[in-house]
């Protein structure tokens, strides 16, 4: 059996292709049911964020699981496997565990050390558990990776000066002009949009408008972020007045197409509009950048912007990588001990049964002994076996999770019929 991690991300694949693999929260239950129903998959978690779509499975065979997950991703994106196979990455066993720890700690993100990913990993795992797609292996590794993420964030500076994706989006826009006095429109009310609003509040932006499908949700967020809320039906009207437009919805298709934005810009008389689209899949038709007056920034621009700050984090990144290696090693040691423990217990129980059977066979010969002498014989045989078993027990435990350990375990099972 193997733990397998297979996926695509926005570093290995062009954005226009990557966004087709996105799985939103409404689609997640069906996606989990689909992947868990595949022939070689026993347990599964689906992690889909603005940076990646990854599937973690516990499977009978790596190659069978790889094909199952590849086919699942092809069906999700509605493109043939050969169209994206060059961009697909896969890890198994120890490498899969190391990859998950790296992802959870934010070292695999567009914004290195960003805080949202740990929460996203936790939510993905919780969804899979609630839907009944996790077992002992998946639960164990995800529990450990979240604990490792907390440790690394507390013992390094990887996240202290690192902004979230939404903070980088606001900083990127602010570099193009002070946002404090501009008319700002935000579309969406999810985690990213909330982050944008919070950052705009810190910048003391005074003219912020929020629009969302649910006006009630928009009003609740607006009240706590010094903004005003408008229904989605008034989006066009608000766009005509806006200077900067942030959008990050969970929509599975475009929210605003090319013709819609052409109409908006005609009403604006081509007055400049900065559009920051951090949704995956994108909310804005990418051809909007060809419309006069529109400056369009997306996740590719955000990643490039964030990379400029990476050099100042190199020291903390190296420390974090070292801690990840330690945490993975510690997890694998614990895993090996848990796997070996039942075998060692079975070995010792088998030998104890032999001891008790022999004492019973000699019961008539021991009948002349008094209670104290019987206890002495019992203690003597226990200690004798204990000394005999001590060395092989220590050897098997120390050799766990190695080829030698596997050979010793197989020999033990065969010799004692365990």
Image (cartoon, rainbow, N blue to C red):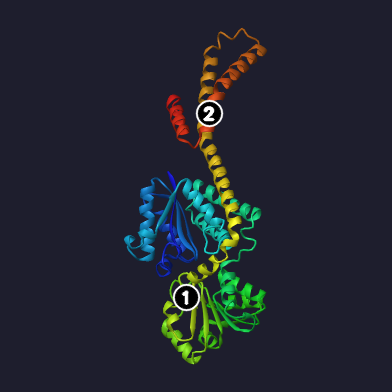
* First in sequence: mark 2 vs mark 1: 1
Q: Residue at x 36, y 59 (%)?
A: 86
In the image, taking residue 206 as reference, residue 363 lies left or right, namely left
The answer to whether residue 97 of the structure is visible from this angle is yes
Residue 367 image position (x, y, % from top left): 59, 9
Secondary structure found at label 1: loop
Q: Residue at x 57, y 76 (%)?
A: 173
Badge 2 crowding class, 10 Å Cα cut-off, few under 14, some 14 to 19, many 20 or more, is: few
Query: Between residues 77 and 362, which one lies in front from this camera angle?
Result: 77
In the image, which disc is placed on residue 283? 1
Q: Residue at x 39, y 47 (%)?
A: 62
Query: In which quadrant of the rendered view does residue 154 lie?
Result: bottom right
Residue that label 2 marks: 395
The answer to whether residue 279 of the structure is visible from this angle is no
Q: Is residue 367 above or below residue 329?
A: above
Q: Residue at x 59, y 75 (%)?
A: 217
Residue 368 image position (x, y, % from top left): 61, 7
Residue 340 image position (x, y, % from top left): 51, 35
Query: Between residues 360 and 209, which one lies in front from this camera angle?
Result: 209
């Amino acid at each position: 059996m193997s733990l397998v991690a297979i996926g695509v991300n926005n570093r290995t694949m062009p954005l226009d292709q990557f966004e087709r693999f996105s799985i939103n929260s409404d689609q997640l239950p069906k996606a989990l049911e689909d992947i868990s129903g595949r022939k070689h998959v026993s347990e599964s978690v689906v992690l889909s964020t603005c940076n990646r779509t990854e599937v973690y499975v516990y499977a009978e065979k790596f190659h069978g699981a790889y094909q199952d997950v590849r086919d699942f991703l092809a069906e999700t994106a509605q493109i043939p496997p050969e169209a994206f196979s060059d961009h697909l990455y896969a890890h198994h066993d120890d490498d899969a565990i190391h990859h998950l720890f790296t992802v959870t700690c934010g070292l695999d993100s567009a914004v290195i050390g960003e805080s949202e990913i740990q929460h996203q990993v936790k939510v993905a795992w919780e969804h899979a558990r609630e839907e009944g797609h996790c077992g002992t292996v998946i639960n164990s590794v995800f529990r450990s990776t979240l604990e490792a993420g907390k440790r690394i964030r507390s013992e390094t500076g990887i996240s202290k000066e690192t902004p979230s994706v939404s903070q980088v989006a606001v900083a990127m826009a602010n570099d193009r002009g002070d946002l404090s006095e501009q008319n700002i429109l935000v579309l969406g009310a999810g985690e990213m949009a909330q982050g944008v609003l919070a950052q705009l509040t810190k910048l003391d932006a005074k003219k912020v408008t929020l629009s969302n499908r649910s006006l009630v949700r928009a009003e609740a967020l607006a009240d706590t972020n010094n903004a005003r809320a408008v229904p989605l039906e008034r989006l066009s009207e608000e766009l005509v007045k806006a200077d900067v437009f942030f959008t990050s919805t969970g929509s599975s298709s475009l929210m605003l197409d090319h013709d819609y934005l052409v109409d908006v810009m005609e009403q604006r008389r081509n007055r400049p509009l900065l559009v920051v689209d951090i949704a995956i899949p994108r909310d804005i038709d990418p051809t909007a950048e060809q419309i006069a007056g529109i400056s369009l920034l997306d996740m590719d621009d955000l990643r490039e912007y964030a990379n400029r700050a990476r050099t100042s984090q190199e020291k903390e990144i190296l420390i974090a990588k070292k801690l990840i290696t330690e945490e993975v090693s510690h997890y694998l040691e614990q895993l090996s001990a848990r796997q070996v423990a039942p075998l060692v217990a079975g070995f010792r129980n088998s030998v104890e049964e032999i001891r008790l059977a022999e004492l019973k066979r000699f019961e008539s010969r021991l009948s002349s002994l008094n209670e104290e002498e019987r206890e002495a014989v019992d203690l003597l045989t226990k200690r004798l076996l204990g000394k005999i078993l001590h060395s092989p027990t220590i050897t098997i435990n120390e050799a766990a999770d190695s080829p030698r350990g596997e050979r010793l375990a197989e020999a033990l099972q065969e010799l004692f019929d365990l």
